[in-house]
Image (spheres, rainbow, N blue to C red):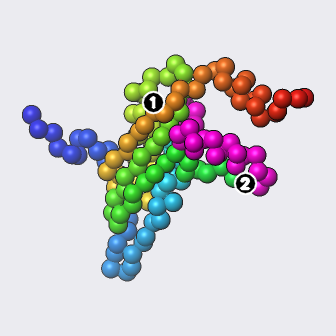
């Protein structure tokens, strides 16, 4: 039995205006979609962080620089066309969380946020789980942040 693509893809917002009209064109930069996707993914309980090992290492260094801001798009790559977008996310999940359920929730929230805010159709959200955050890793991270001597 064949299924249509409509059954697999969440419905787009009914009130989203087209980006190309007779009155002009709206272009959305890939960094905008990247930030929306990163923030939407972080909203889901069970997502500890985004990015691979090197990305998180650079983020830790950036956090120690006064005035530097964490990037909302860390661990997110996107392809944006005139009407569609595709997203790749790299996640670090909390230990004990169902990865399949978490991926489903992250995918749904990401698609919803991008489509509602931009009017773009999200054709896919690929998720790579790079690591599992263990509860005792917080103690080690705090010790590294404060240094050897108190």
Residue 105 coordinates in the image, percent (x, y): 43, 34
- Compared to residue 128, the image places residue 124 above or below, namely below
Q: Quadrant of residue 121?
A: bottom left
In what quadrant of the picture does the C terminus appear?
A: top right
Q: Residue 85 at what x, y percent from top left?
A: 37, 56
Per the image, label 2 sits on a secondary structure element best described as loop
Q: Is residue 90 left or right of residue 124?
A: right
Q: Is residue 100 above or below residue 7?
A: above
Q: Residue at x 60, y 41 (%)?
A: 56
- Residue at 53% in and 26% down: 132
The verdict on residue 29 being magenta is no
Residue 13 pos. (x, y %)? 37, 53
Tell me which segment is drawn in magenta.
Answer: 44-67
Question: Seen in the image, is 9 located left or right of residue 150?
Answer: left
Q: Is residue 54 highlighted in magenta?
A: yes
* Pointer 1 residue: 102
Closer-to-camera residue (82/65): 65
Sooner in the amino-acid sequence: mark 2 or mark 1: 2
Whole-angstrom CA distance, mark 2 to mark 1, is 30 Å
Q: Residues within 10 Å of mark 2 (few under 14, many from 20)?
A: few
Q: Residues within 10 Å of mark 1 (few under 14, many from 20)?
A: some
Q: Is any atom of residue 119 visible in this view? A: no
Q: Which residue is mark 2?
A: 68
- Number of numbered tags placed on the structure image: 2
- Residue 115 seen in render: yes
Q: Quadrant of the N terminus?
A: top left
Q: Position of residue 136 (x, y in %)?
A: 67, 19
- In this view, the residue farthest toward the left is 1
Q: Secondary structure at mark 1?
A: helix
Q: Quadrant of residue 3?
A: top left
């Amino acid at each position: 039995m064949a299924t249509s693509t409509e059954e697999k893809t969440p419905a787009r917002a009914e009130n989203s205006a087209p980006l190309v009209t007779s009155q002009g064109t709206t272009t959305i930069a890939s960094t905008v979609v990247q930030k929306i996707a990163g923030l939407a993914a972080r909203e889901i309980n069970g997502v500890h962080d985004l990015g691979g090992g090197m990305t998180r290492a650079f983020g830790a260094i950036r956090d120690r620089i006064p005035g530097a801001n964490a990037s909302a798009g860390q661990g997110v790559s996107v392809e944006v066309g005139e009407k569609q977008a595709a997203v790749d996310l790299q996640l670090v999940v909390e230990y004990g969380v169902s990865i399949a359920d978490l991926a489903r929730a992250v995918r749904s929230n990401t698609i919803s946020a991008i489509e509602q805010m931009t009017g773009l159709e999200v054709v896919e959200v690929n998720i790579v789980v790079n690591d599992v955050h263990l509860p005792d890793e917080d103690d080690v991270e705090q010790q590294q942040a404060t240094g050897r001597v108190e």
